[in-house]
Amino acid sequence: METIIKDSEKQIKQFVVEDFRTAAVFSKYGIDFCCGGEKTLEDVCKKKDIAVSEVLGELQNVLEASTAQNIDYKSWPLDLLVDYIEKKHHRYVEEKIPVLLQFLDKLCRVHGERHPELIEINEHFKASAKDLGAHMKKEELILFPFVKKMINLTMSESGTEAPPFGTVLNPIAMMKHEHDNEGDRFKEIAKLTNNYTPPHDACNTYKVTFAMLEEFEKDLHVHIHLENNILFPGAIKLEQQFM
């Protein structure tokens, strides 16, 4: 109870300074963490008629979320890995893209004249958001179900018909090509942001956006690693059992 009271009396900007990931929660509730960041959480929630306990609960979930380390993904069954990628990394992309698009648009409006590189960064990320959305749908509707189908058939020792795409090598080649495109795109974003270093005149939104972009790229690297280096080779090996 004391912790709840203490946190409710904390300034909005303190949450964001301590962990930028909390900015997404404040954005969801329409709470200004930038210009109005000196107000306490309790005061803002009262004014907006929001239950402070509800916001604190979401903040706690964000703060407790941590990236698992030293997991031996190679030992996982492929269907478990598929579910993990979809629920962990695909969901992350879907949740973060709208927030980043909103923040980048705001930065372009407010700071674009002094920092024209923001316009280019925004264009790159919008293209990434569009392409990643289509990319993940292809995986979820075509590749992932086929991998699960092969696993089920292996367990039942049944044969399998050739998929409409011929061999799993074909969608995998396309997915890897699209992964390369995203890798190149984020190299350019990193370059334009000076490796996600905000300028000296950056406001809180500016700093949070760059930190979120950096986290997004890191998650994407793990996401691509799991697919390119573990899932895809495993799917190719699995398919060979039916040839």
Image: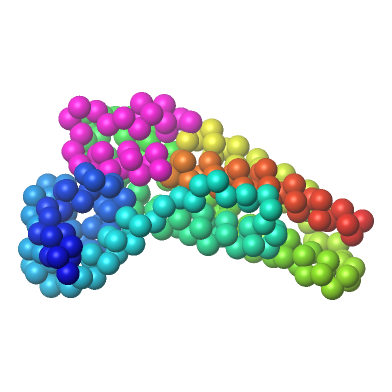
Left or right of 130? Residue 148 is right
Query: Residue 171, how many percent across, how many down?
Result: 72, 51
Camera-side residue of 64 and 30: 64
> Can I make out residue 90 in this image?
yes
| The N terminus sits in image quarter | bottom left
The residue that appears at 12% across and 55% down in the rendered structure is 10
Q: Quadrant of the C terminus?
A: bottom right
Please give the range of residues in magenta: 187-215
**Is 63 located above or below residue 53 in the figure?**
above
| Residue at point 51%, 47% (across, down) | 69
Instruction: Identify the image's colour scheme: rainbow, by chain, secondary structure or one colour.
Output: rainbow
Q: Position of residue 229 (x, y in %)?
A: 67, 43
Q: Where's residue 96, x and y in %?
A: 39, 53
From this viewpoint, which residue is outermost toward the front? 2
When asked about the image quadrant of residue 189, the answer is: top left
Was residue 214 drawn as part of the magenta stretch in this picture? yes
Relative horizontal placement of residue 15, taking residue 83 as reference (left or right): left
Q: Is residue 159 above or below residue 137?
A: below
Q: Nearer the viewer, residue 189 or 147?
A: 147
Whether residue 107 appears in this view of the structure is no
Q: Along the horizontal axis of the image, is 10 left or right of 233?
A: left
- Residue 168 lies left or right of residue 63; in this view the side is right
From this view, report whether residue 85 is shown above or below residue 116: below
Q: Is residue 100 magenta?
A: no
Residue farthest to the right, as pictured: 243
Whether 9 is drawn above or below 100: the answer is below
Q: Residue at x 55, y 46 (%)?
A: 70
User: Across the whole image, how many numbered discs are drawn on residues?
Assistant: 0
The kind of secondary structure the magenta stretch mainly shows is: helix
Give the residue displayed 17% in from the left and 30% down from the top: 201
